[in-house]
Image (tube, grey):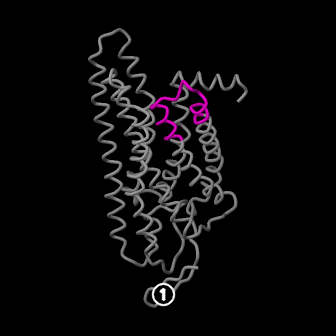
């Protein structure tokens, strides 16, 4: 039981309530079916991809290890967010405990940062493959992937852990209703009777430091890749080189486009329904997760062949 006191206001409660689309209750009805479909699609596609890479020896290569990491992150993010949203839609289970709320906040922020960093490492992998093909086997090794995974994990956890800690140290008084479907940092912090300037600044600075640096490095990688590709003179070499990077570039577009739209709606939120940013935030946790493995499965011949072989074996 949590008890907090601020002046004459004294409130005692043990959980938060997620106020999900209360201004647009009809959204819950028409969103529940597509969200359920996207969740099942994301879980099925990512699990299929992970099993294929695990069982197919031909896919035991650094690029596919990175793809496995991305699939694992997508799966965890989906399971952290979407089942709770569907429980609100179907059974009106709006209550979420203090610990569960801040844990969800940590998972969303840290895994989001891990995905961004994974895209950056994947861009570097494609840069080495296209710009330094002869050195690729000696640079992108299993040891490199292990170090990259440790870097992705430690960097993301270290920089995002203060977010739920700062929110958890606040005093919550009066209201325990979160105007969101998920425990987003600022949606929770606004309920506090303390000054949340530090929370705002850290969310802004930390977010743009992580995502901004990753996007800059991804952009630089693809600039060098494009320059190297345009210098190729062998027939079909340009198309082949662009094809190897196409899937990765599409995934980055999924990831960044929804994020940019979400940020844009927050900037102009006074001119539109407050439920729109909430909807985009929810969709951002499931649409890329559902589409990422499908894009790689469709566009990567090795993965398609691996899935076909597993199906023939009866898996």
In the figure, residue 202 lies in which quadrant? bottom left
Q: Is-magenta flag for residue 63?
A: yes
The answer to which of 242 and 258 lies nearer the viewer is 242
Q: Is residue 257 visible?
A: no
- Residue 136 shown in magenta: no
Residue 207 position in % (x across, y down): 36, 54
Residue tagged 1: 9
- The answer to which of 191 and 65 lies nearer the viewer is 65
Q: Identify the residue at image location x=41%, y=37%.
A: 143
Relative vertical location of residue 59 with respect to residue 39 in this rendering, above or below: above
Q: Does residue 261 sit above or below 303 in this rendering?
A: below
Q: Is the magenta stretch mostly helix, strand or loop?
A: helix
Quadrant, the C terminus: top right
Kindly indicate the quadrant of the structure image that contains residue 100: bottom right
**Place of residue 102 in the rendered image (x, y in percent of width and height, measured from the top left):** 50, 65
Say how many tags the image has: 1
Residue 142 makes an appearance in the image: yes
The span shown in magenta is 49-71
């Amino acid at each position: 039981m949590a008890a907090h006191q601020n002046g004459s206001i004294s409130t005692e409660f043990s959980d938060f309530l997620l106020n999900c689309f209360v201004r647009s209750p009809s959204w819950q009805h028409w969103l529940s079916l597509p969200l359920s479909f996207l969740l099942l699609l994301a879980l099925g596609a990512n699990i299929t991809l992970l099993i294929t890479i695990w069982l197919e020896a031909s896919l035991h290569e650094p690029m596919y290890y990175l793809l496995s990491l991305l699939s694992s992150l997508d799966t965890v993010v989906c399971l952290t967010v979407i089942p709770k949203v569907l429980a609100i839609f179907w059974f009106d289970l709006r209550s979420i405990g203090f610990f569960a709320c801040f844990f969800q906040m940590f998972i969303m922020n840290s895994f989001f940062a891990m995905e961004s960093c994974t895209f950056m490492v994947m861009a570097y992998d494609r840069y080495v493959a296209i710009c330094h093909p002869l050195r690729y086997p000696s640079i992108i090794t299993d040891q490199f992937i292990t170090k990259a995974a440790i870097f992705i994990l430690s960097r993301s956890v270290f920089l995002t852990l203060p977010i739920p800690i700062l929110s958890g140290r606040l005093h919550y008084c009066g209201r325990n209703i979160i105007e969101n479907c998920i425990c987003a940092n600022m949606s929770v912090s606004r309920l506090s009777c303390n000054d949340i300037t530090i929370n705002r600044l850290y969310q802004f600075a930390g977010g743009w430091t992580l995502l901004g640096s990753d996007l800059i490095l991804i952009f630089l990688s693809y600039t060098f890749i494009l320059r190297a590709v345009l210098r190729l003179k062998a027939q079909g070499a340009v198309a082949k080189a662009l094809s190897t990077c196409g899937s990765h570039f599409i995934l980055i577009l999924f990831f960044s486009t929804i994020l940019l739209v979400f940020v844009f709606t927050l900037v102009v939120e006074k001119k539109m329904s407050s439920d729109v940013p909430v909807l985009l935030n929810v969709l951002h946790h499931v649409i890329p997760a559902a589409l990422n493995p499908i894009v790689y499965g469709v566009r990567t011949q090795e993965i398609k062949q691996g899935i076909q072989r597993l199906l023939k074996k009866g898996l």
